[in-house]
Amino acid sequence: MRMSIDQAVELIENASLKELGEMATKRKRELHPKKVTTFVVDRNINYTNICWVDCKFCAFYRHEKDSDAYVLTFEEIDDKIEELLEIGGTQILFQGGVHPKLKIEWYEELVAHIHNKYPTITIHGFSAIEIDYIAKISKISIEDVLSRLQAKGLASMPGAGAEILNDRVRDIIAPRKIDKDIWLDIHHKAHKLGIKSTATMMYGTVETNREIVQHWADIRELQDKTGGFRAYIMWSFQSDNTLLKQEFPEISKQSSNRYLRLLAVSRLFLDNFTNIQSSWVTQGSYIGQLALKFGANDLGSTMMEENVVSSAGVKNEMNQNDMITLIIDLDEYPAKRDTAYNILERF
Ligand code: SF4
């Protein structure tokens, strides 16, 4: 029988770490019996840091008038993609702030430019809040934004912006961000158009354990309907340089223990998700490695460039060889994958 919300809360609060690791590993083995741990070689490209949404937990955004505000030129984007190709990369995680003025035509031209010039690169881009605002400013529907970008070469969508799918929490940490139902609806619409996506969660601000589990229940329900989520990824709030930390100084840094507990319970609760990524970017490489013993089967990206988490004071780095070493160290088999989780190379 499916795990209930009450059962998941009970596990988070009362199960031992050892017990959680064992249960999550058992479930992981059912889904991934060959002990293969994957990763993708990609690059984050944040095409702009200009954003009007002003989420209180975000240290990345700037306003148009700020001296360090930017929108990358096509040439700058090309240079970044060429560096990625040199190291055998296959994907760009392409997202930005929510620019107040850019409309659908600008995005179409950009996606078409990348797709036509670099056809081997998968464009994994634009979170639900960007899609929502492009629709609003361009006065077209969400479906039109998605299908027009898909026609130009958008392959899949990251799950960013989910934070906690609860409007009480969202009203505190990101009052101008889209509501929970809109986030879910945009992913639903993307899935219906054949655009796969990922589901994410950022915890560690003002949410309760029950709100965390309700977030899992909502993405599990959508996954039941569409099967369109390729993976689940969660990370903890990184507080440096954020307004939220100034407003709520009592918010404390989340422990590695809590990360591993939540990860393990997510593996058990999200019974219709095949892939769960470890977030070594926020947790550090060794907790990222340990996450493989708590339900994660993928180390995510090698992250050639990361701007969002590092703006909040956290800088972790790993290249392909570091990942391979960590995976072998746990007696698993490393493999490079593409965005769709097809294996490209084994080591
Ligand atoms: S999290 Fe995204 S939407 Fe929110 S302020 Fe930062 S860049 Fe803007």
Image (cartoon, rainbow, N blue to C red):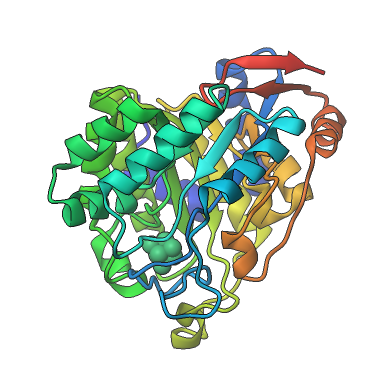
Point 61% across, 71% down: residue: 253
Is residue 14 in sight in this rendering? no
Q: 91 above or below 73?
A: above
**Which corner quadrant holds the N terminus?**
top left
In the image as oriented, which residue stretches furthest toward the top?
Answer: 34
Point 61% across, 35% down: residue: 296
Point 52% across, 86% down: residue: 249
Q: Closest to the observer: 322 or 338?
A: 338
Residue 74: x, y in percent?
Answer: 52, 47
**Which corner quadrant holds the C terminus?**
top right
Q: Closest to the observer: 34 or 306?
A: 306
Residue 267: x, y in percent?
Answer: 51, 35
Ligand 1 shown in quarter: bottom left
In the image as oriented, which residue stretches furthest toward the front?
Answer: 75
Is residue 338 shown left or right of residue 2?
A: right
Residue 21: x, y in percent?
Answer: 65, 38
Is residue 53 shown left or right of residue 290?
A: left
Is residue 271 shown left or right of residue 84?
A: left
Residue 79: x, y in percent?
Answer: 65, 44
Is residue 117 in sight in this rendering? yes
Number of marks drawn:
0
Is residue 325 shown left or right of residue 252?
A: right
Q: Closest to the observer: 175 or 9?
A: 175
